[in-house]
Amino acid sequence: MKTPLEMERKTRETGPVTWTESNGGHWLVSHADAVSEGLRDASNYSTEKFTKEDGEPGGGVMIPTVPFYRYLPNESDPPQWDVFRKSIAQHLSPASVQSLQPLLDSYVTEVIDHMIELGEADFVMQVGSPITALITLHLLGLPPTDWHFYAGPIHALFAAPETAGPGVAAIQVRLAQTIQDRKALPERGLVDDLIAQQADGKALTDDDIKDLVFDVMVGGFDTVAGLMAGAIQWLQDKPEIKQRLIEDQAFLRSANEEFLRYISPAVGLSRTATCDYTIADQEISAGDRIYFMYRSANWDPEEFESPEELDLERMPNPHVAFGSGIHRCVGSNLARAVFRTVIPEFLSRILDYEVVEFEQYRLTNNNAGFAKMIMRYTPGTKVHEEPLFDHI
């Protein structure tokens, strides 16, 4: 059986835009220039969900369509998109992310403290998942003590999707109740700011708020954890590179971009054509579904020299790991901050780790990541003998 990367290479070799009959039939856009062109084009596509003539859900950013909720702001079009995007963008601006740095530093130190004496740990569930969940919940204004409740089902969405339903449903119920509770007793966080905008007459329903919050979780938890896990796996037998990442901030920033390109945690997302048009000399009909392949674009030899090799000093590096256009990842600043905080501290404290077992996601057409990554290492020393937090 071919790997996803082998299938993507074959698709690129067939042409920039090709048709597949899978999942009801849709177009695959695989070349870097065509992917970038399509992602920047907001006039010929829609990401909205809709109900088809047979009563089944259609549209959205995933193939097949996920029927349960809207991934907002991604599954919206202007002018509604403007309201949704602006509602969360200020919380994820460079300045806002910078203000989170002291807390992020503390979380990273504490999480590593929890596993450093064990000698064996699952990087995904004992490092990547708690750090990304804790900082995201703080941003949202949700209790950090609940991070297991939220992170477990969202991880299962990609690692074991057949088991995720009950947990995701419980999250939806919890968020709906939280919105009502916060209307009565406001606190501080993105949830409360969204409710305040609703009270000011902005076009936000309770379901909009719930779906916006859930999508921040989906985007903030496992995608970043998967990026870090992939980097840690690759670095395990490269001591000189590990030391440079600890000592050289410029090299760390460059490496961050190359790991984003190479791993491409968001593998691709879909659109629906709103009119007849042409992309890369291929005619597309109104109503056709199109899958834009981010990772394939990032591995396109027409765009990147030796794309299947990791070059941590690659410049320029015009990857589309965060997408492009109006639906570019709104959380990119936070994702970079988490990576650049976790990687050097982990490498400086866990000196001799070896990955002994790993399992990648089974659901691979939307996200690349790991269900688990077991490593062994020489036990180290905690920074804080007494925990800083009681919820990790």
Image (spheres, rainbow, N blue to C red):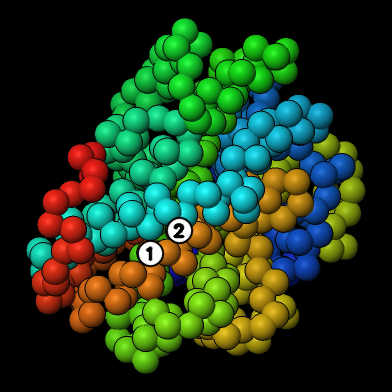
The 10 Å Cα crowd at callout 1, few under 14, some 14 to 19, many 20 or more, is many
The residue lying at 65 percent from left, 86 percent from top is 305
Residue sitting nearer the eye, 47 or 392: 392
Q: Residue placed farthest to the bottom in the image?
A: 240
The residue lying at 30 percent from left, 80 percent from top is 236
Residue 212 at what x, y percent from top left?
56, 30
Q: Is residue 167 left or right of residue 357?
A: right
**Which element type, helix, strand or loop, lies under badge 1?**
helix
Quarter of the image for residue 237 reads bottom left
Residue sitting nearer the eye, 306 or 248: 248
Which of the image's four quarters has the C terminus? top left
Residue 340 at what x, y percent from top left?
46, 67
Quarter of the image for residue 316 reads bottom right
At label 1, the amino acid type is Val
The 10 Å Cα crowd at callout 2, few under 14, some 14 to 19, many 20 or more, is many
Residue 341 visible at all: yes
Which of the image's four quarters has the N terminus? bottom left
Q: Which mark is residue 342?
A: 1
At label 2, the amino acid type is Val
Q: Is residue 186 left or right of residue 304?
A: left
The residue lying at 62 percent from left, 57 percent from top is 322
Residue 302 at what x, y percent from top left?
73, 80
Residue sitting nearer the eye, 196 or 359: 196
Q: CA gap, disc 1 to disc 2?
A: 6 Å
Q: Residue placed farthest to the top in the image?
A: 184
Do labels 1 and 2 touch, CB within 8 Å? yes
Q: Is residue 314 above or below residue 334?
A: below
Residue sitting nearer the eye, 53 or 65: 65
Which residue is label 2 attached to? 338
Q: Is residue 221 above or below residue 204?
A: below
Residue 33 at what x, y percent from top left?
78, 68
